[in-house]
């Protein structure tokens, strides 16, 4: 029994079957990669997990509880964090504040009014955020407005925002797209390190096979909304079906 | 007492609408005030000072002090009017506040003046409440009121339209509307008319078609528009558009009545007012000596005849000045005493009484009709009847004026 | 390497223009932040230039400045395209002169369908490929033509963005990370298309984090670091020069 | 100090000093001089400055932080005023219970209206709040006349019970006070030709305004304030970060509604009449304009904006042609006439025109409002020493 | 029954005014994304175009008539319009009588010019600014425009009648088998309704059958990208603004005979027109028109005596009540597009 159990999930958009009968089981403390051609339904699947979309049929269980019908913030409070395909950050806030907000969310829950305390008196939160920023090499940019970051930096910031919450399940939608190679490598190291330090399960969508094969314990290949194969990385590489539908010659 | 003038001048506060829908009326009131100050200070031709029965005023200011004035904008909002009045009292040291073009403002400012210990001489305010349930010892009204409109209009209506009429009232949904409807209903029903419908219309309404249309289907043969200002202009225009004036109902010609007329409104409604009855406080075509003197001096200075609002405001200023002279003091309580029960003549509208019980003045009321062939843009109304004061006089405890107490005069700190 | 153009001839610069697209000593600011700090390079007609550098090096800013978008604002320097002074134009004029930019965040217009997004590109002259031909190139878009553009999957949006640029008859194609978020097979496809475009004589500037792929495609390469050029030479040179790669590209 | 950052403490102290010495600062011109017209140091206007300051500060907590633009905020001001006047009528002329009731009742209204309106965002939210306020205005003006006084406004009467105040002593309506201190009491102090007025009501309001301002600073700098700014920036991300935005926005809405109610209660305490126009959409629009004019999202901006608008309304509107002639009496006759004709449309009954022009000028030339203007001036001054080559730190100016 | 038909007619007529104003507003507000508080002022200026034209047509020469006196007893100045002198009294009178319809021709260029100047000179700089700034600047502009009109025309309403042939009313009831005089309806209001239908149709056609609408919508969603596609979006925005101003102005011209124009009539309509646009849904022209008619009809029914006697005051609040209900049940109004002004 995995920590995340997706059973028979279907999702249609009008005439389009975006997800058809998806079954997925992610074991605790593993990295599970989902790959597949563009438009296969990978992001849609993640959307169903975080409450952005409600699947037409099927069930999604996390840690023994159903996530369906819960609000996004409730799902996050259960321990699921997500990095989006196009960075979702608080553009008007500084980088540091961007990371502090999730710190508060995981300490205080979905709502708590600290209307009188000063942000600066929250030393532990600030330190936590700063340490996180150092981990992603962005401490020097902590006073910048998040909106004026370059694209790669926005990605890293968003990842920091998710990691600082110490989630049980981290969903990453193309976390290294647009990242410089050096930073991609750093990110791989960072994710590996985090995984070695604490209990965390990750679900990662990536088109960069270098990242996928460096991190993944298991890989599911999704095509046209249905899982094509699920296997260990070594076997995926050689799978002719996957090569044809997705990897092409260059892999 | 508050704001006692110590120097060689005395300051009056003219609080009129300068912005908003009544700005033109306010502008006319200001002209009248300017003229009154001129006359009080002995400039110009003296206007009504010559005809006024009390001869206390000498054209040397008030009690020898030159009259100066400050102006403010009421915006026809009670809050803004009070703010403006307070600034005149607190900043400019005004000893008397006057003006306004609606009952809401008059009542609000009157209450303020009572608290502050300043005399308030109301401008245009027609609601019964001003000298009814909201009366105050420091406030006086020279304008007529809803009850008087009803009392003056009813006999004329009966004479022209008969006593067997079915009336339908459209009433503006606020205090003035309520008191006017009540007054007109009471007096027309006393003549034998029947009221077949009354509908309240929102103050902010601009298109009255959905209120006019049902009149067509009622069995009414008279429509009474208890509206003022823009409301009246629009509802009358709409009523005429719907052909009510060309209509026969119950075998009679359908008629429209507008209880309170002003020249500015008549101008706004244009040709639609022709032949429609209403009442008014004063009109420039009155032929008595006092009115003529006022028209002459106003007309010469500004180039057109004064409105009823201008007349009221002018008279109020003279009355106040005269009362101070007679009392020999600016102290509000002395002024109140001098004005209470004061009888005078020579300010238009014939012999007049400022009644002590409610500070309402009693004088002749005019019933007018929209003129068929106006010769100028100011010549829109013709006087049909000058209703004598006795006919519009009522007991101080008349039910339409019940509640409220005058209290005692306040000299202020 | 860099030939300093002869500006002394004023308007007759056309005769001395060293290249098809010339950027000379360009300085550009976002508000008060000085980002592009004096860049000069030339691109010859029909050439593919790879513009490389780390996150935040100023690649996107350079492309945006060339396309004459409002920010960053060029405060000094000149940009010439086919004898036309671009630095004196605004963005729609530049576009009409033949600049086509595929922006990094794709910029699919919300509220419009896929097809309308393409039609929009063909309103102002000069018109390029027909919409049908674009659908042949990206069959995926043909299938989704009635769908609202912003609901496309990430990769589909990228295709639409490229297709939109080709729908206009452009002289220079500026690609900002075109492979980002695309499945390897599609990247292969696009690479083929870019070669095809090159054959048609369209000049291309490509910004890409996957430097090796870009360099294999490109004729020449320019490497940026903190808003200045640190290398300008042939693509092969970069591939051979290990130091350069390690220092600026971390590969 | 006070648990504030240094920058904010400085700001608070400056504001405190300004309000304390307002009777001097606002009356810079000697009595009787031509410029005395521009003096604003009389009780009514000074009270209005601080009361509308409170209103705008509260509005800014909602709008400046969360970006939710309420177009019906005046409704809470009106509700506060009515509650306060009712308290005067029924219970006591002491202002404390009146103000407390004003805040409680407006808070309750804010809970209900906020709960419903916050289901939508953007313009849809604005229109929902507008609709509620307009309904409240329309009903208060007409059907609810027995409760609200309708057109004339709710006012005190001699016959009111006032159960706590005991037997009526005089034939006049009592005035609101604070344990014997009457709100309208003033002391005048003449220094040469200058006259300064110190009014109890003003200092009472000013003290409350400072408290309200202090609280607003704390909110702005608190994690709660940070969350609100995050709501403005990206609600989606808030949700996926495990935060429920609704309680945050509702809390902000209620707090700002209570600020409005407090302002309404104070208004009634200074002048015990509550008019329905207080709730009309133009009144709601006014506070929006005050906030933007001063600088939305800044601490002091809304107070400045409120000051400007109230100043124009009360001072400019009172200048009439006669006064103009007085001012330009030194000019030769023809020129005097000319100058007066030129200036006349902008003052007195034309004060709205000037107001409109100021609105336009401020947004066009000072995006970010008056505070932005102040910052620019500040920067000008700061740049000079920097240019002299010393290491002047480019510090962010106070908001 | 006849009462209901009558109220439907009323509602349609009221609705056509709302729809027409909202149409212009939604072009600026729903499509260009500018919160234009000066829109009411444009409507008002349209109405004053009618006033101005009738003033121009009645420009008069004056002569002194010694036989009559004015109110001060001086010889009377009599005015004779030049139109009477030039075209003869009969044709002259007719031209003056037709001032309002003629004002349509007069208003179109004037309003387009005002719209274009406004956009080029002011609004242009505000597309990228926050909505709050737009509110402040357009509200300021509205006040300025109002005050200018007030300065020249005064605060009082100015009667501006329709041509004589449209005076009186049409017996609608007879047409559908009711008693004579049970359902009558003023001619001019029927004209207004037809006029509104034509304008609405024309605007729809323009935006539907040309790519103009699509480009403007795209430009609003993302100006920068549209510019990258070689499209001069500024020019189109200007045109759009000109059209919107003209629509607002024409609505005003035709409205002048229904209610005498005054300088604050724009503000009276402003809030209502925003409500209509938002209830219709941001960015949707059909939505705005539908909402205009819907609210017009609802308002008419709520004003019936039968209704107000059960629910006193309902006529005061009905529009807002319906607006709240619609916005709560339909998140983006009747037909709103996603993402337009939702944040
Ligand atoms: N709201 C929507 N309405 C209609 N179709 C949609 C919607 N959202 C997604 N789709 C379609 O569903 C399919 C799956 O999309 P999804 O975003 O899950 O793909 P993906 O696997 O993440 O692809 P990529 O790798 O390119 O990001 C796509 O073809 C997309 O066009
Ligand atoms: N709108 C902006 N305002 C201020 N600074 C900005 C803005 N956009 C980008 N910058 C800054 O400009 C620098 C260069 O950014 P640019 O986007 O050009 O980098 P890039 O080379 O494209 O990086 P990436 O590979 O991450 O996309 C960065 O430091 C970034 O923070
Ligand atoms: Mg995806
Ligand atoms: Mg980039």
Image (cartoon, rainbow, N blue to C red):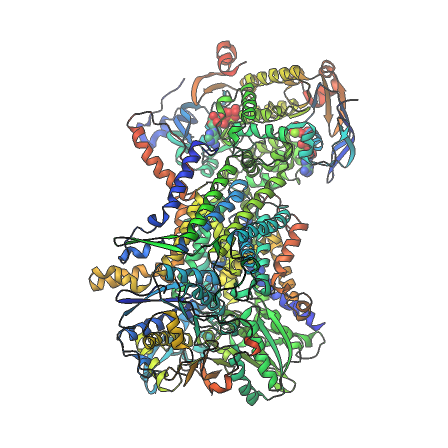
User: Is D126 placed left or right of D209 in the picture?
Assistant: right
Residue E275 coordinates in the image, percent (x, y): 58, 55
Relative to E298, say whether D363 is above or below: above
Residue B120 coordinates in the image, percent (x, y): 41, 69
Q: Quadrant of residue C7?
A: top left
User: Is A19 placed left or right of B408 in the picture?
Assistant: right
Q: Quadrant of the image for the N terminus of chain A?
A: top right
* Residue D134 visible from this viewpoint: yes
- In the foreground, D357 or B83: B83
Q: Quadrant of residue C71?
A: top left
- In the foreground, D381 or C108: D381
Relative to D72, say whether B348 is above or below: below
- In the foreground, D105 or A5: D105
Image point 48% across, 47% down: which residue? D54
Relative to D63, say whether B139 is above or below: below
User: Is E29 placed left or right of E337 in the picture?
Assistant: left
Residue E141 coordinates in the image, percent (x, y): 43, 54
Residue E109 coordinates in the image, percent (x, y): 45, 59
Number of numbered discs visible in the structure rendering = 0
* Residue D309 visible from this viewpoint: no
Q: Quadrant of the image for the C terminus of chain A?
A: top right
């Amino acid at each position: 029994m995995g920590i995340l159990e997706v059973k028979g999930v279907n999702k249609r958009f009008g005439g389009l079957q975006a997800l058809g009968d998806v079954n997925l089981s992610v074991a605790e403390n593993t990295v599970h990669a989902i790959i597949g051609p563009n438009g296969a339904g990978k992001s849609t699947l993640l959307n169903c997990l975080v409450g952005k979309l409600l699947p037409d049929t099927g069930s999604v269980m996390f840690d023994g509880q159903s996530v369906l019908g819960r609000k996004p913030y409730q799902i996050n409070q259960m321990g699921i964090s997500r990095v989006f395909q196009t960075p979702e950050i608080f553009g008007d806030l500084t980088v540091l504040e961007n990371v502090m907000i999730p710190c508060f969310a995981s300490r205080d829950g979905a709502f708590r009014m600290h209307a009188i305390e000063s942000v600066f008196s929250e030393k532990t939160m600030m330190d936590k955020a700063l340490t996180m920023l150092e981990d992603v090499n962005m401490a020097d940019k902590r006073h910048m407005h998040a909106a004026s970051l370059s694209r790669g930096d926005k990605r890293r910031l968003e990842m920091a925002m998710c990691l600082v919450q110490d989630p049980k399940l981290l969903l990453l939608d193309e976390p290294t797209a647009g990242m410089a190679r050096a930073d991609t490598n750093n990110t791989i190291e960072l994710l590996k390190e985090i995984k070695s330090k604490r209990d965390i399960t990750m679900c990662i969508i990536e088109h960069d096979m270098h990242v996928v094969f460096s991190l993944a314990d298991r890989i599911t290949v999704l095509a046209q909304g249905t899982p094509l194969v699920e296997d260990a990385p070594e076997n995926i590489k050689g799978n002719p079906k996957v090569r044809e539908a997705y990897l092409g010659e260059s892999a | 007492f508050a704001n006692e003038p110590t120097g060689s001048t005395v300051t009056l506060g003219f609080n009129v609408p300068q912005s908003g829908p009544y700005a033109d009326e306010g502008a006319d009131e200001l002209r009248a005030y300017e003229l009154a100050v001129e006359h009080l200070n002995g400039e110009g031709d003296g206007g009504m000072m010559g005809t006024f029965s009390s001869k206390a005023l000498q054209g040397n200011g008030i009690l020898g002090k030159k009259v100066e004035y400050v102006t403010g904008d009421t915006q026809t909002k009670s809050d803004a009017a009070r703010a403006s009045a307070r600034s005149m009292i607190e900043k400019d040291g005004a000893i008397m506040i006057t003006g306004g073009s609606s009952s809401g403002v008059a009542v609000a400012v009157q209450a303020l003046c009572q608290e502050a210990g300043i005399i308030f001489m109301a401008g245009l305010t027609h609601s019964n409440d001003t000298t009814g349930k909201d009366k105050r010892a420091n406030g006086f009204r020279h304008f007529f009121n809803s009850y008087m409109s009803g009392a003056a209009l009813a006999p004329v209506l009966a004479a022209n339209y008969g006593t067997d009429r079915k009336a339908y009232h459209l009433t503006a949904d606020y205090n003035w509307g309520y008191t006017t409807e009540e007054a007109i209903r009471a007096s027309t029903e006393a003549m034998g008319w029947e009221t077949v419908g009354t509908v309240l219309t929102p103050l902010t309404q601009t298109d009255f078609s959905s209120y006019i249309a049902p009149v067509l289907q009622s069995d009414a043969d008279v429509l009474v528009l208890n509206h003022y200002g823009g409301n009246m202009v629009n509802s009358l225009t709409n009523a005429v558009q719907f052909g009510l004036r060309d209509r026969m109902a119950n075998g009679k010609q359908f008629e429209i009545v507008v209880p309170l007329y002003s020249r500015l409104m008549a101008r706004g409604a244009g040709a639609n007012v022709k032949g429609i009855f209403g009442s008014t406080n004063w009109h420039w075509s009155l032929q008595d000596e006092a009115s003529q003197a006022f028209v002459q001096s106003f007309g010469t200075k500004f180039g057109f005849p004064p409105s009823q609002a201008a007349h009221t405001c002018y008279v109020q200023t003279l009355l106040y000045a005269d009362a101070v002279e007679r009392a020999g003091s600016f102290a509000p309580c002395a002024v109140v005493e001098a004005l209470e029960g004061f009888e005078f003549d020579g300010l238009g509208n014939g012999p007049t009484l400022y009644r002590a019980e409610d500070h309402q003045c009693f004088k002749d009321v005019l019933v007018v009709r929209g003129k068929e062939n106006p010769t100028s843009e100011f010549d829109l109304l013709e006087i049909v009847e000058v209703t004598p004061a006795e006919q519009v006089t009522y007991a101080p405890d008349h039910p339409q004026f019940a509640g409220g107490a005058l209290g005692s005069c306040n000299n202020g700190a | 390497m860099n030939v300093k153009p002869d500006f002394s001839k004023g308007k007759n610069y056309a005769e001395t223009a060293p290249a098809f697209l010339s950027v000379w000593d360009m300085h550009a600011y976002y508000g008060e932040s000085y980002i592009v700090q004096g860049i000069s390079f030339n691109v010859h007609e029909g050439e593919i230039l790879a513009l490389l550098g780390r996150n935040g090096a100023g690649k996107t800013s350079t492309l945006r400045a060339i396309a004459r978008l409002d920010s960053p604002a060029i405060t000094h320097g000149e940009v010439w395209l086919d004898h036309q002074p671009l630095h004196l134009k605004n963005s729609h004029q530049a576009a009409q002169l033949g600049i086509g930019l595929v922006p990094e965040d794709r910029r699919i217009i919300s509220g419009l369908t896929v097809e309308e997004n393409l039609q929009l590109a063909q309103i102002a002259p000069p018109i390029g490929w027909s919409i049908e031909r674009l659908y042949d190139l990206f069959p995926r878009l043909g299938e989704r033509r009635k769908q609202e553009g912003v609901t496309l999957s990430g990769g589909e949006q990228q295709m639409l963005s490229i297709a939109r640029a080709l729908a206009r008859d452009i002289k220079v194609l500026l690609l900002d990370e075109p492979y980002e978020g695309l499945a390897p097979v599609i990247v292969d496809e696009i690479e083929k298309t870019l070669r095809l475009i090159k054959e048609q004589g369209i000049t291309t500037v490509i910004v890409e984090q996957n430097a090796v792929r870009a360099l294999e495609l490109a004729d020449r390469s320019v490497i940026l670091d903190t808003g200045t050029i640190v290398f300008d030479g042939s693509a092969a040179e970069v591939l051979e020069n290990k130091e350069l790669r390690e220092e600026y590209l971390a590969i | 100090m006070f648990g504030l950052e240094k920058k904010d403490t400085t700001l608070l102290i400056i504001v405190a000093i300004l309000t304390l010495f307002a009777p001097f600062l606002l009356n810079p011109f000697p009595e009787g001089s031509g410029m005395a017209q521009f003096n604003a140091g009389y009780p009514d206007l000074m009270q209005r400055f601080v009361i509308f300051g409170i209103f705008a500060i509260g509005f800014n907590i909602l709008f400046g932080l969360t970006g939710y633009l309420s177009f019906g905020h005046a409704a809470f001001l009106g509700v506060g005023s009515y509650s306060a006047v009712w308290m005067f009528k029924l219970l006591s002329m002491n202002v404390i219970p009146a103000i407390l009731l004003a805040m409680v009742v407006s808070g309750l209204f804010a809970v209900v209206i906020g709960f419903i309106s916050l289901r939508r965002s953007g313009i849809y939210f604005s229109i929902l709040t507008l609709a509620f306020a307009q309904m409240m205005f329309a009903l208060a003006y007409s059907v609810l006349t027995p409760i609200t006084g309708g057109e004339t406004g709710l006012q005190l009467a001699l016959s009111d019970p006032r159960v706590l105040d005991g037997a009526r002593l005089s034939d006049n309506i009592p005035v609101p006070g604070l344990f014997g201190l009457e709100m309208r009491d003033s002391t005048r102090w003449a220094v040469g030709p200058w006259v300064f007025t110190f009014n109890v009501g003003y200092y009472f309001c000013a003290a409350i305004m400072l408290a309200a301002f202090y609280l607003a600073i704390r909110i702005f700098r608190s994690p709660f304030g940070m969350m609100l700014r995050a709501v403005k920036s990206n609600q989606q991300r808030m949700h996926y970060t495990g935060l429920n935005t609704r309680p945050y926005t509702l809390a902000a809405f209620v707090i700002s509604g209570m600020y409005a109610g407090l302002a309404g209660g104070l208004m009634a305490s200074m002048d015990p009449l509550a008019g329905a126009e207080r709730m009309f959409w133009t009144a709601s629009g006014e506070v929006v304009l005050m906030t933007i004019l001063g600088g939305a999202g800044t601490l002091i901006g809304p107070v400045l904006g409120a000051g400007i608008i109230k100043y124009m309304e009360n001072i400019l509107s009172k200048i009439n042609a006669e006064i103009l002639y007085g001012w330009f009496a030194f000019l030769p006759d023809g020129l005097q006439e000319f100058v007066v004709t030129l200036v006349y449309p902008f003052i007195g009954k034309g004060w709205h025109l000037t107001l409109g022009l100021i609105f336009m000028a401020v947004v066009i030339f000072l995006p970010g409002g008056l505070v932005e203007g102040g910052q620019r001036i500040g920067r000008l001054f700061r740049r000079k020493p920097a240019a002299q080559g010393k290491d002047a730190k480019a510090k962010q100016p106070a908001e | 029954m006849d009462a209901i038909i009558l109220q439907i007619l009323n509602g349609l007529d009221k609705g056509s005014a709302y729809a027409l104003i909202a149409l212009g507003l939604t072009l600026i507000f729903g499509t260009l994304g500018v919160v234009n508080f000066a829109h009411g002022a444009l409507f008002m200026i349209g109405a004053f175009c009618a006033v101005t034209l009738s003033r121009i047509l009645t420009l008069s020469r004056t002569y002194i008539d010694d036989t009559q006196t004015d109110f001060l007893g001086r010889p009377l100045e009599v005015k004779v319009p030049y139109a009477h002198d030039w075209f003869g009294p009969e044709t002259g009178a007719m031209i003056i009588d037709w001032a309002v319809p003629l004002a349509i021709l007069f208003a179109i260029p004037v309003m387009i010019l005002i719209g274009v100047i406004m956009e080029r000179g002011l609004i242009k700089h505000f597309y990228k600014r926050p909505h709050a700034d737009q509110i402040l600047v357009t509200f300021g502009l509205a006040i300025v425009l109002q005050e200018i009109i007030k300065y020249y025309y005064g605060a009082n309403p100015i009667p501006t009648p329709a041509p004589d042939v449209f005076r009186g009313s049409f017996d609608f009831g007879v047409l559908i088998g009711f008693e004579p005089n049970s359902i009558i309806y003023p001619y001019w209001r029927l004209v207004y309704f037809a006029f509104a239908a034509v304008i609405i149709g024309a605007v729809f056609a323009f935006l539907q059958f040309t790519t103009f609408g699509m480009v403007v919508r795209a430009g609003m969603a993302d100006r920068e990208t549209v510019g990258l596609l070689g499209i001069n979006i500024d020019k189109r925005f200007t045109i759009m603004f000109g059209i919107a101003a003209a629509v607002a102005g024409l609505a005003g011209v035709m409205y002048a005979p229904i209610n005498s124009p005054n300088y604050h009539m724009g503000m009276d309509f402003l809030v209502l027109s925003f409500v209509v646009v938002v209830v219709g849904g941001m960015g949707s022209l059909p939505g705005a028109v539908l909402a205009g008619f819907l609210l017009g009809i609802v308002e008419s029914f709520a004003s019936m005596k039968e209704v107000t006697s059960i629910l006193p005051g309902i006529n005061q609040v009905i529009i807002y009540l319906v607006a709240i209900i619609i916005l709560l049940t339909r998140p983006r109004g009747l037909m709103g597009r996603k993402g337009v002004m939702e944040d």
